[in-house]
Image (tube, rainbow, N blue to C red):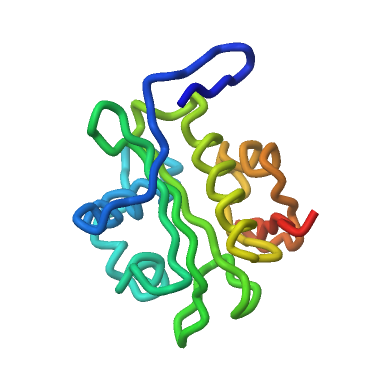
Amino acid sequence: MIYSFGGVKISNFNIRKINSNELHLLENFLYEAIFQRDETRLIPRDVINQPEVRVFIEDFGKPDDYCLVADIKGKVVGAVWARILSGEVKGFGNIDDQTPEFAISLYKEYRNIGIGTALMQDMLKLLKEQGYKRTSLAVQKDNYAVRMYQKVGFEIIKELEEEYLMVCNLAT
């Protein structure tokens, strides 16, 4: 598939549903999704085992779980996934038990070339086709990705101390 960003055509990646034998990759992408303010002092990887973080991937594959990946010549370089987090432990961007919450990440060397935007757009389309009315996410205020989320249709609905709670209405 060919994607165009700012007049530049990117054709060397494919967006597809994740295969069941690739679900283990979500651990890597969950860690990559964590905003690292200081690249010289990275948050320890075991942070993904905290219940409020782990909930984004634990037992992934339920009926309301969706995941798309960016694949370059057989290598998965990014993922976007959404799921309804309505159990005892909720996601940071949870707004209710009807709204899937978004997570997205790419390996560092594949960022800022349009792959993330393409993943987001395809996931929004998929969720709309599945009948969801909206989707949500939480993002650190100083995360550069805020602009990408706004570009694809997310709006800030609540400002917390360090984060924005954002929603994308899919019904329009």
Q: Residue furthest right?
A: 172
Quadrant (top left/top right/bottom left/bottom right) for the C terminus = bottom right
Q: Viewer-proximal residue, 54 or 23?
A: 23
Q: Position of residue 113 (x, y in %)?
A: 48, 23
- Which quadrant of the figure has residue 120? top right
**Residue 39 in view in this figure:** no
Image side of residue 10 versus residue 98, left or right: left
Could you say which is closer to the camera, residue 85 or residue 45?
85
- Picture residue at 23% right of the left edge, 33% below the top: 74
Q: How many marks?
A: 0
Q: Residue at x 27, y 50 (%)?
A: 28
Q: Residue at x 57, y 40 (%)?
A: 145
Instruction: Please provide percent x and percent y for residue 86.
Output: 52, 81
Q: Does residue 67 appear anywhere in the picture?
A: yes
Q: Nearest the camera: 121 or 58?
A: 121
**Quadrant hosting residue 58:** bottom left
Whether residue 117 is situated above or below residue 159 in the rendered picture: above
In this orientation, which residue lies closer to the viewer: 7 or 131? 131
Please name the residue shown 56% across and 67% down the image: 100
Query: Where residue 124 sits: x, y (%)?
Result: 60, 50
Percent coordinates x, y for residue 138 in the rendering: 58, 59
Residue furthest bottom in the image: 88
- Residue 116 higher or lower than 165, as above or below: above
